[in-house]
């Protein structure tokens, strides 16, 4: 499928008008980094007797329900690091793994700080950074995102997080918070993500949106069924280098 | 005075023990960038009939009183961008300057986003970044600090601001907030600053401290009288490269 680079929207970039987009805000887990592959590798290294792919999928599956408990007010503000740990305890129970020490569990939880970038990520971000201000807009906490950036060489201009806004995506405070941070209009911010629910929430608030295909987000043996082009997104890119090309950067 | 590099404290770094400092948190205005020279140059370029140095000094002099109004609760949370603009209006009145358009005033206010780094700043930060996580801890707002970093090439691992903690230095929430962000102890954070009041507040909360001489912070014709070594600081450095040397990095 590599040769099919669908782009119904780049024609919207009118070269005669100044490009109104100033800030690209990136979703991180899945869009910038490969959580599934990174966790599966870590689990394999730990030598736990479990299907690494299933373990990664289960850990990630607890993510939205855990955030929903914060968003609803059932839990007070809780960082992703702590939510990841809560979910991990349940996943270890579900997979009947009781061989890990506290130190091993703590270290395993930090795998989220050291997720590997997709192959195109660093070069694509460097290209996009030459024209735009590039920031994160992630539900990951600041410490996690900073350590990830240092580890993977992600050249962010600014790390923004749900932790700054004390709201998790898709709460409006997050998307509008990016625009407010830079004192610009929502339509001068473009969210870049591989998740259509995230993009749709941003779109409804007036942000520009770019969908990036990450066909292997859930692992090489899981085929994502939501790669189709949507009429309401502004860009649909194969990867960050393709997005840079569509934006006239490289 | 350049040859005198006083350092009574680097002996505290015991090479046989793991270095407990993990994060270096930098004050920005004056420590990392030259606000006085940058503003004076901008005022000169604007062609305002005024002593550029006196104008820069007056603008900066309004900074602490303005923040004090926020810290006391007299003003609600207000970003530095907006405080700078409030102060600017008063300074323009005081200097009897009424020739600037709204667009010119807005542009002048943004000079704080484009302050020039001291000559040693970028190389020193690059060296320190090879061993430590380097972050800002500034009263400047996130958008200001991000634009400054992009403009001056400051390689921060994370931009932290009073805006994240909704408290201005020297409120404890700021210094302790850095440690909390990285889930480490206060003594694993070292504040790097050229202002002893800032350092003393951090020291009292258990952070490590490094004073950096910036003899020309208030301009080449103003001689700072507070360059003496203090017994309570952990390091006293001529500049960032000297600090890196004392920390065993370069």
Image (cartoon, coloured by chain):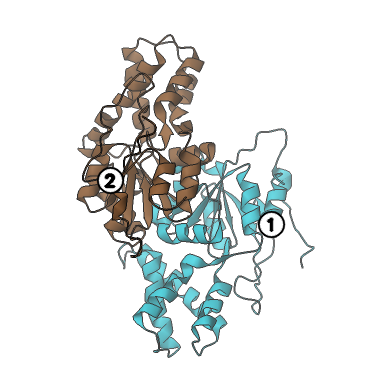
Chain colours: A cyan, B brown
* Label 2 to label 1: alpha-carbon separation: 57 Å
Point out residue B185 in the picture as x, y percentages from the top left corner. Answer: 28, 60
For the point 51% across and 53% down, which residue is it? A136
Coordinates of residue A148 in the picture (x, y in percent): 49, 61
Foreground label between 2 and 1 = 2
Q: Which residue is at the front of the view, A200 or B105?
A: B105
Q: Is residue A177 left or right of residue B76?
A: right
Q: Which residue is mark 2?
A: B8
Q: Secondary structure at mark 2?
A: loop
Question: Would you name the residue on which mark 1 appears?
Answer: A237
Location of residue A97 (image quadrant): bottom left
**Residue lying farthest right?**
A3
Q: Is the residue marked by circle 2 packed among few (<14), some (14-19), or many (20+) residues within 10 Å?
A: some
* Residue B170 in the image, given as x and y percentages of width and height: 25, 42
Q: Are marks 2 and 1 in contact (CB under 8 Å)?
A: no
Q: Secondary structure at mark 1?
A: strand
Residue drawn at (50%, 66%) of the image: A114
Identify the disc placed on residue B34. none
Identify which residue is drawn at 43% across, 70% down.
A110
Q: Which chain does the numbered disc 2 sit on? A: B
- Picture layout, residue A45 above or below residue A194: below
User: From this viewpoint, is residue A127 visible?
Assistant: yes
Residue B206 is left or right of residue A28, and the answer is left
Placement of B47 over or under B182, stated as above or below = above
Name the residue: 45% across, 14% down.
Answer: B100
- Res B7 → quadrant: top left
Of A48 and B120, the residue lying toward us: B120
Query: Which x, y percent locates residue B18?
Result: 35, 64
Q: Neighbour class for label 1 at 10 Å: few (<14), some, many (≥20)?
A: many
């Amino acid at each position: 499928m590599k040769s099919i680079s669908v782009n119904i929207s780049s024609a919207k970039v009118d070269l005669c008008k100044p490009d109104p987009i100033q800030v690209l805000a990136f979703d991180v887990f899945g869009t910038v980094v490969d959580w599934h592959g990174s966790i599966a590798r870590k689990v394999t290294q730990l030598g736990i007797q479990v299907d690494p792919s299933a373990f990664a999928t289960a850990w990630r599956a607890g993510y939205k329900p855990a955030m929903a408990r914060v968003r609803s007010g059932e839990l007070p503000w809780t960082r992703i690091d702590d939510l990841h740990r809560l979910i991990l305890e349940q996943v270890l129970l579900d997979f009947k793994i009781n061989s890990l020490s506290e130190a091993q569990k703590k270290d395993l939880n930090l795998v989220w700080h050291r997720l590997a970038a997709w192959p195109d990520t660093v070069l694509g971000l460097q290209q996009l950074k030459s024209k735009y201000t590039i920031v994160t807009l992630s539900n990951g906490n600041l410490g996690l995102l900073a350590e990830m950036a240092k580890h993977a060489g992600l050249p962010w201009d600014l790390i923004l997080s749900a932790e700054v806004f004390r709201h998790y995506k898709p709460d409006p405070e997050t998307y509008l918070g990016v625009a407010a941070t830079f004192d610009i209009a929502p339509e001068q911010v473009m969210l870049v993500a591989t998740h259509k629910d995230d993009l749709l929430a941003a779109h409804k608030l007036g942000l520009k949106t770019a969908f990036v295909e990450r066909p292997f987000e859930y692992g090489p043996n899981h085929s994502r069924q939501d790669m189709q082009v949507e009429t309401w997104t502004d860009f649909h890119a194969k990867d960050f280098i393709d997005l840079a090309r569509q934006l006239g950067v490289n």
